[in-house]
Image (cartoon, helix red, strand yellow):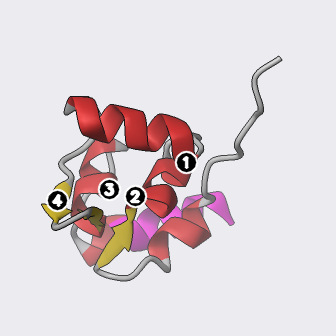
Amino acid sequence: MPKVIPALTLEELLELPVSVDLVTAGKAFGMGRTKSSELARKGEFPCRVLRLGNSYRVPRIEIFRALGMHDTPEHTLGLAAESA
């Protein structure tokens, strides 16, 4: 049976720094390390990934966009208020 990876909560998403490593980005989509790496290598990760040498970085805004979140503070605050 596949391991279930809990996705990041809205609060955790809002606390992300400007860019994150591939494993953290994968958690936002409910994926583990192996699946995240596999999709990034194939160019099939759910959002844009930056390859920097031997590692990957994912801009927070790209995660937000892939999840249907807007990058405006007003919208983000609205989402946070709705989930409270």
Q: Distance between the residues labelled 3 and 2?
A: 15 Å
Secondary structure category for the residue under label 4: strand
Q: Which mark is residue 22?
A: 2
Q: Is residue 46 visible?
A: no
Q: Tell me if label 2 and label 4 are in contact, CB under 8 Å.
A: no
Quadrant in the picture for residue 2: top right
Q: Is residue 60 visible?
A: yes
Q: What secondary structure characterizes most of the magenta part?
A: helix
- Residue that extends furthest to the front in the rendered view of this protein: 54
Q: Tell me if label 1 and label 2 are in contact, CB under 8 Å.
A: yes
| Residue 82 part of the magenta-drawn span | yes
Q: Which mark is residue 64?
A: 3
Identify residue for label 4.
51
Q: Is 13 left, or right, of 68 in this rendering? A: right
- How would you rate the neighbour count of disc 4 (Cα within 10 Å): few for under 14, some for 14-19, many for 20 or more? few
Quadrant in the picture for residue 30: top right
Q: Earlier in the sequence, mark 1 or mark 4?
A: 1
Q: Which residue is drawn at 71% across and 46% down?
A: 6
Image location of residue 74, percent across then percent down: 30, 73
Q: Nearer the viewer, mark 3 or mark 2?
A: 2
Q: Residue at x 32, y 64 (%)?
A: 75
Secondary structure category for the residue under label 3: helix
Q: Is 44 left, or right, of 2 in this rendering? A: left
Which part of the image, by quadrant, shows the N terminus? top right
Q: Residue at x 37, y 71 (%)?
A: 20
Identify residue for label 1.
33
The magenta stretch is 76-84
Q: Which of marks 3 and 1 is in front?
A: 1
